[in-house]
Amino acid sequence: MSKCKPCPFCDIAQNPSHPRNVALNDYAFAIRDGYPITLGHSLIIPKRHIESFFATSEAEKQCLLELLEQAKAQLDVEFQPAGYNIGINDGLAAGQTIPHLHIHLIPRYQEEGKDPRGGVRWVIAEKADYWSRQ
């Protein structure tokens, strides 16, 4: 995957007072997703332009996970979700559309008539509902 130009996440990383920033530390920052799936959907992003989670340094991983915890705590207070999905689309085949690593923190809420079982398994819908075939 080649570096995207311009990179929307690099633009935010270079501007610590950017209005979408909700938290930051030495190696990473957290923002609300520009196209949220649910209320409070957030992204945890390394400041360094890097495409894959597997290419991060130990210090970057530590900072990403610290911000993930911090963002979750903020969402707990602000929106009181019933659960969370945490995901990384790592590579084109995984659905990554911006070639700058970002971790999705997606608050989940109880929805009348919706069965949340399977969670992220629905990425491949035909394999998601394994419990009905048992």
Image (cartoon, rainbow, N blue to C red):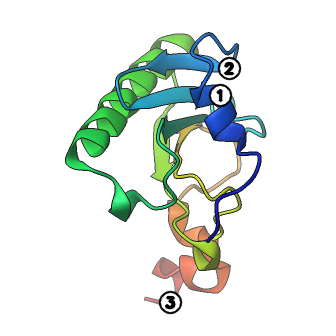
Mark number for residue 35?
none
Where residue 20 sits, quadrant-wise, is: top right
Q: Secondary structure at mark 2?
A: loop
Which residue lies at the image location 55% right of the left edge and 12% below the top edge?
78
Which residue in the protein does label 2 denote?
Answer: 20
Residue at image location 58% in from the left, 52% down from the top = 100
User: Is the C-beta separation of discs 1 and 3 under 8 Å?
Assistant: no
Identify the image quadrant of residue 94: bottom right
115, 99: nearer the viewer: 99
In the rendered structure, which amino acid carries the disc numbered 1? Ile
121, above or below 84, in the image: below
Disc 1, SS: helix
Quadrant where the image shows the C terminus? bottom left
In the rendered image, which residue does mark 1 sit on? 12
Q: Is residue 62 visible?
A: yes
Residue identifier under label 3: 133
> Pointer 1 and pointer 2: residues touching (CB < 8 Å)?
yes
Determine the secondary structure under disc 3. Answer: helix
- Which mark is nearer the camera, 3 or 2? 2
> What crowding class fits label 1: few (fewer than 14 Cα within 10 Å), some (14-19), or many (20 or more)?
some
| Cα separation between marks 3 and 2 | 43 Å
| Residue type of the residue flagged with mark 2 | Arg
Residue 18 position by quadrant: top right
Residue 46 place in picture, x, y as percent: 45, 40
Residue 73 locus on image (x, y percent): 39, 19
Residue 111 visible somewhere in the drawing = no
- Decide: is 30 above or below 130: above
